[in-house]
Amino acid sequence: MSSSSAAVPKHLNFITGNKNKLAEVQAILQGVIELQNQNVDLVEIQGTVEEVTKDKCRRAAEAINGPVLVEDTCLCFKAMNDLPGPYIKWFMLSLGPLQMHKLLEGFEDKSAQAVCTFGYSAGPGHEPILFQGRTDGKLVQSRGPTVFGWDSCFEYEGQTYAEMDKSEKNKISHRGKALDKLKEWLGSQV
Ligand SMILES: O=P(O)(O)OP(=O)(O)OP(=O)(O)OC[C@H]1O[C@@H](n2cnc3c(O)ncnc32)[C@H](O)[C@@H]1O
Ligand SMILES: [Mg+2]
């Protein structure tokens, strides 16, 4: 039997191999809930971001045999009907942040949307619950430190994510917005 209902967790076990993601999630959830981390290499299927995150969450719950939090991040270009979306990681690995803007060179519309989807499962057999945040911006030539993924080529209100202070990014970011929803859910559980 599959169920999403479960008591509110005392801590969250965030399964990710991405240190930069982990650092942001730790900063945003500080003082809200205790965060643990395990790095499990999870297969990521093809599909919509919701399908990818749910599947990732189920696999993580089975691998750990317990409650898990996972997250999948997309970068969607309007001119490309939302591609690369969940496949942005492979474009990042292949092009890197310095060449990413070339993807939209032939298009006038540089609009991009960053999408972050967290999935929480209370354990194997428990249906994942999703929390999603979206931030609109545009794809630009890299500006700022190239520390985290495509931060230096995603511009939001005149600044790239990489040019912002971390705390500033976390306030308006796709991840910050998704975690606002997770916090609201945690607060609503008794
Ligand atoms: O283990 P997981 O959590 O899956 O970590 P990952 O690095 O594989 O992450 P994703 O599958 O979600 O792929 C998203 C890609 O986008 C990058 N990314 C994620 N969040 C980002 C952010 O806030 N700013 C810039 N790049 C980001 C990340 O480095 C990946 O290349
Ligand atoms: Mg991944």
Image: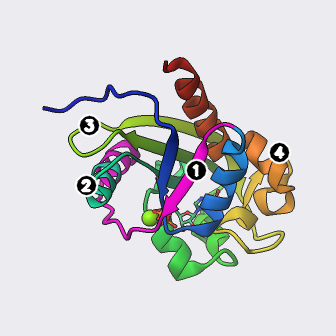
Q: Which residue is mark 3?
A: 126
Q: In the drawing, does residue 9 fall left or right of residue 57?
A: right
The image quadrant of residue 28 is top right
Q: Tell me if label 3 and label 4 are in contact, CB under 8 Å.
A: no
> Residue 86: horizontal and vertical position, in percent?
44, 57
Dot 3: element: loop
Q: Residues within 10 Å of mark 3 (few under 14, many from 20)?
A: many
Q: In the drawing, does residue 133 fall left or right of residue 17?
A: right
Q: Mark 3 or 2 closer to N-term?
A: 2
Q: Residue at x 33, y 62 (%)?
A: 44
The image quadrant of residue 30 is top right
- Depth check: give the residue in front, 33 or 100: 33
Question: How far separated are the C-alphas under marks 4 and 1?
Answer: 31 Å
- Depth check: give the residue in front, 131 or 49: 131
Q: Which residue is mark 1?
A: 35
Question: How far separated are the C-alphas under marks 1 and 3?
Answer: 20 Å
Q: Is mark 1 within 8 Å of ligand 1?
A: no
Q: Which region is colored magenta?
A: 32-56
> Residue 145: horizontal and vertical position, in percent?
81, 73
Q: Residues within 10 Å of mark 2 (few under 14, many from 20)?
A: some
Viewer-nearest of discs 1 and 3: 1
Dot 2: element: helix
Q: Which residue is mark 4?
A: 157
Question: How far separated are the C-alphas under marks 3 and 2?
Answer: 10 Å
For the N terminus, the image quarter is top left
